[in-house]
Image (tube, coloured by chain):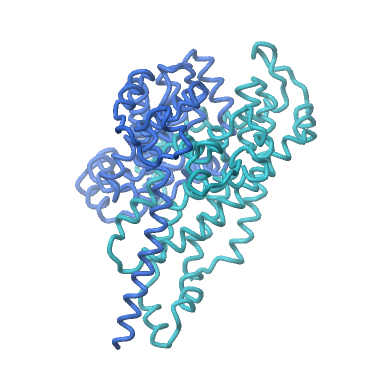
Chain colours: A cyan, B blue
Amino acid sequence: MKKKMTLAEKREARWAYLFVAPTMIGLIVLNFYPIFNTVYQSFCKTGDFGKGNIFVGLANYQAVLSAGETWQSLWNTIKYALIEVPFGIVIALILAVLLNKKIGGRSIYRTIFFLPMVCAPAAVAMVWKWLYNTQFGLLNNVFHANISWISDPKIAWISIGIIGVWSIIGYNMVLFISGLQEIPGDYYEAASIDGASGLRQFFSITVPLLSPTTFFIVQTRIIGALTIFDLMFMVMDKTNVALPKVQSIVYLFYQYSFTNGNKGYGATIVMVLLAFIMILTWILQQVEKKAVYHA
Amino acid sequence: MEGSIARQRMNKILTHIVLIIMSFIMLVPFAWMILTALKTNQESISVNPFYILPHNGWHWENFATVWKSYNFLILYKNTLLMIFWRVVCACLTATMAGYAFGRLKFPGKSFLFSLVLIQMMVPAQIFIIPQYLMVSNMGMLNSMFGLVFPGLVTAFGTYLLKTGYEGLPKDLEEAAMIDGCNIGQRFTRIMMPLTRSSMVSLGIFTAVFAFKDLMWPMIVCTNATTTTLSAGLAKMQGQYGSEYPTMMAAATLAVLPMVIIYVIFQKQFVEGIATSGGKL
């Protein structure tokens, strides 16, 4: 029986290899070779004029891990995530629940909330930088305030976080809406007949049944927030005194690898980021087993 | 009964109020961008009095000035070409690989697919230095090839299309097999056309991702004539950051193409991003 199938099976396998070949070759050249190369470079020092790698063992790791700047940037990135992820999710969930009702103008609202998602972060950051301008900015002039939104180290990280929340709400909301639409309407009807209030329904039906969607968003947004770069790069000038307290770990990576040309050091920063993300991914998987409601 | 109808109306009005306030917050930055772009430099930095609207005429010519002086035509061309090639490459390679992973049996399938999943799990920053060095060693810095390079294949798209192909009914292909179609014909004539919605999702996702990307074009295309809109904006800000109407006109021009496409195809955009669930 098995022998008879072989010819057809072989033919199928040949087609399959032909079909996956471009993607697999591409992934090896563009992604897997680079992973090993980055690991290798993290043990090397970039020679003068960017030529040649000199093996230096763990020297880069020693330098990166003992630099206060590395830990500060990692902490800055976490602080950014602590604003963007929870606020971006809670506001998006509220909007999704409101837009899931039968009300007029739903698609207009949805279009507006989703709009930042299709705008280049470089442009978005420029606009917000201008809104935040201490002297001429809209915010300080309308509220008659004199806040150094992006140059006071105590405030700047929050200001950047606000841009992050504003940018991501629409995306999270759209994912929540499609999650909400999968919850059968009868559940709510049954709950109404039993006399459950709207709030009670939200916490007893919506929250548990939406938890797979919520978890997916939490997971992708945490990883997304930890690799933030554009907002910091565009909003914070190099001379900004708040920069050390705001720059993200990827910003630091960019500075060392491409502005200072120290690719070995940059590669080591990426390895630190990779380790951090791997640990977080593992923790998230443990949380998923406990917190996500599987119907 | 009447009381409950009144309550429902009240609820609806409250919902609209919340949504309108939120919409206002979402739109203020866009409004301020356009209003500033229409002012004179002097007006934009006038504080006492502070002007919300341009008060001595709307300076539409600011857009024309920026368009000419910053070579926007070239930035548009580069950005659109990069998006075009990335979408073509992503859709082509992903639909083929997705079909093989989703419908065909072959030795080593699960190993190869695990490579696809691993690529999606690691942060993309780990690829950047070696990718840059490859482009640089090929002498392809400041070229279209350099811009497209990291997007020649897509692990995420392969995963997305695999899911799409898996969802198709089995009997379709079996019928074609009985009719004597070989695998290549089954793929191009029957299966591929049925995954159109996944392809549209992938295309939109790829286009938006490429459009928004800042770091890659900034490092491989450092010339003002070879770079994209995003990286071009970064360059302009470095040079002319305090000419606010100019900068806001540039930002408007940079977001405009994608916003127009989005407004026309918003249903596909929203669905494409919601169903693909890609990390943008």
Q: Is residue B135 visible?
A: yes
Q: Quarter-wise, where is residue B123 in the image?
A: top right
In percent of width and height, residue B258 lies at: 34, 37
Q: Is residue A15 left or right of residue A80?
A: left
Q: Residue at x 66, y 36 (%)?
A: A242
Q: Is residue B123 above or below residue A169?
A: above
In percent of width and height, residue A240 lies at: 63, 31
Name the one closer to the observer, A246 or B182: A246
Q: Is residue B7 left or right of residue A38?
A: left
Q: Residue at x 35, y 31 (%)?
A: B253
Q: Residue at x 41, y 47 (%)?
A: B28
Return the residue found at the far left: B179
In percent of width and height, residue A78 lies at: 65, 47
Q: Is residue B237 above or below residue B225?
A: below
Return the residue found at the far front: B48
Name the one closer to the observer, A166 or B272: A166
Q: Is residue B53 above or below residue A175?
A: above
Q: Is residue A138 left or right of residue A34?
A: left
Name the one closer to the observer, A210 or A137: A137
Q: Is residue A267 above or below residue A157?
A: above
Q: Quarter-wise, where is residue B99 in the image?
A: top left
In percent of width and height, residue B260 lies at: 29, 39
Q: Is residue A80 left or right of residue B68?
A: right
Q: Is residue A16 visible?
A: no
Name the one closer to the observer, A75 or B163: A75
Image quarter of the N terminus of chain B: bottom left
